[in-house]
Amino acid sequence: MIDIIGSLRRVVTPDRKGARSAAPVKEDRHKQHNLFEAAATFVSASVEEDQARIDEASGWVSPEALSFGVSELACRAVIALARERGESPQTVARTLLGLPDD
């Protein structure tokens, strides 16, 4: 099986070796969020119907990056549930969406 998650991680995670010094920079006072933090916050806030947090997370990254992060979160959640339930990812995804069995 192809390691999709590992491949995606290599694509979206920049190589930061040597990119920064160990000393904090004044511009770093405000935490910069990555697309996965934005996606996790966006999805959990959506579940809780917390519009302020939805808006906040939406501003952390570009809409495209947020969409990618939400998609990645969905994939990981379906894989985890499928393993937990001993079912195929397709069965789990269809069940979560309330779709009939194929």
Image (cartoon, helix red, strand yellow):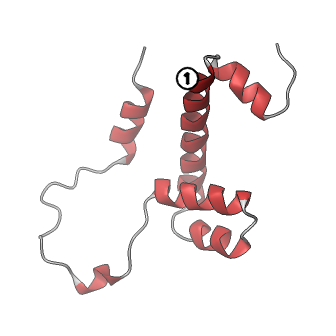
Camera-side residue: 15 or 100?
100
Q: Look at the image and tell me in which quarter the N terminus lies.
A: top left
Is label 1 in a helix, a strand or a loop? helix
User: At 17% across and 62% down in the image, what residue appears?
Assistant: 19
Return the x and y of residue 73 as percentages of the image width and height: 56, 43
Return the x and y of residue 26 as percentages of the image width and height: 25, 86
Horizontal side, residue 20 vs residue 8: left or right: left
Return the x and y of residue 56 as percentages of the image width and height: 60, 73
Q: How many marks?
A: 1
Disc 1: CA contacts within 10 A as few (<14), some (14-19) or many (>=20): few
| Quadrant hosting residue 75 | top right
Q: Which residue is mark 1?
A: 83
> Please, is residue 40 above or below residue 79 in the view?
below
Return the x and y of residue 90 as percentages of the image width and height: 69, 20
User: At 76% across and 65% down in the image, what residue appears?
Assistant: 49
> Please, is residue 2 above or below residue 98 in the view?
above
User: At 30% across and 79% down in the image, what residue appears?
Assistant: 28
Q: Look at the image and tell me in which quarter the C terminus lies.
A: top right
Horizontal side, residue 20 vs residue 81: left or right: left
As shown in the figure, which amino acid type bears the numbered disc 1? Arg
Residue furthest out toward the bottom: 26
